[in-house]
Image: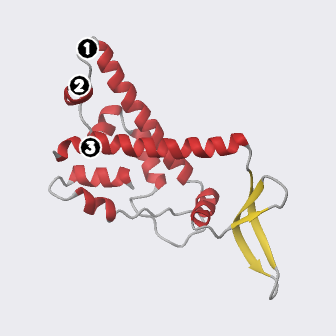
Amino acid sequence: MLYFALKEKTANPGEAFFAAYVNTEIREVFKRSKRKPTDKSARNMIRELKEASIERFRATLGLPDFEEWSRLWGSQKRPRREERMRYYKELRSLKKRILQAAQNRSVSRLMASYNKTKHGFAVLDEDGTNNVFLVERAKSLGRRTSSIQAIPFSVADSSVEQLVENTKNVALTSRLLLQLYARKLD
């Protein structure tokens, strides 16, 4: 949401960022869906990010150019060339994290399971193990029986670490984007 809200605010600087953020609706359209795609989807975000140069990425989101960034967050102790390298490294890293978040969102099975899981009602626990099943679909076979299609998820240190790492990356990306953008709100 933040990516599209920043694009909207940059394109319409007279409008409030909060309104752009709250009114951003992202709709994923997967192959079997009868819904129509919107311009705000992970698929479009991925395409835009892959096509955008670092400069276009920066300008599209209204992020500071090197001169402004250097005044706000740069170090007078480092040589200018090092500062410029740091600036572009941070921008590339930010773009990469946003792209990864969009790619995670664009996988329909994961997205549907995540949406159900975040509401806390579509996970089955296998007793005595570290396995859970992220329920995708259930079909009634009678009053007390259902057939279930699920994605197995082993709660091992590595899978939890990956989940935590992905969550941290999204949080860091959001914080950095807001930090970089907020300098205009003073």
The residue to which callout 1 is attached is: 80
Residue occupied by mark 3 = 181
Q: With respect to residue 119, does 168 lie above or below?
A: above
**Percent of width and height locating residue 154:** 76, 50
Looking at the rendering, in which quadrant would you find the C terminus? top left
Residue indicated by mark 2: 70
> Is disc 2 in contact with disc 1, using a CB cutoff of under 8 Å?
yes
For marks 3 and 1 on the same chain, the one whose residue lies earlier in the sequence: 1
Q: Residue at x 70, y 40 (%)?
A: 158
**How many numbered discs, if any?**
3
Considering the numbered disc 1 on the image, is that residue within a helix, a strand or a loop?
A: helix
Residue count near mark 2 (Cα–Cα under 10 Å), binned few <14, some 14–19, many ≥20: some
- Identity of the amino acid at label 3? Tyr
Residue 100 at least partly seen:
no
Name the mark on residue 20. none
Residue 57 to residue 2: above or below: above
CA gap between label 3 and label 2 equals 14 Å
Left/right placement of residue 184 relative to residue 180 reads: left
Q: CA distance from mark 3 to mark 1?
A: 23 Å
* Coordinates of residue 31 in the picture (x, y in percent): 59, 63
For this orientation, the residue located farthest to the front is 128
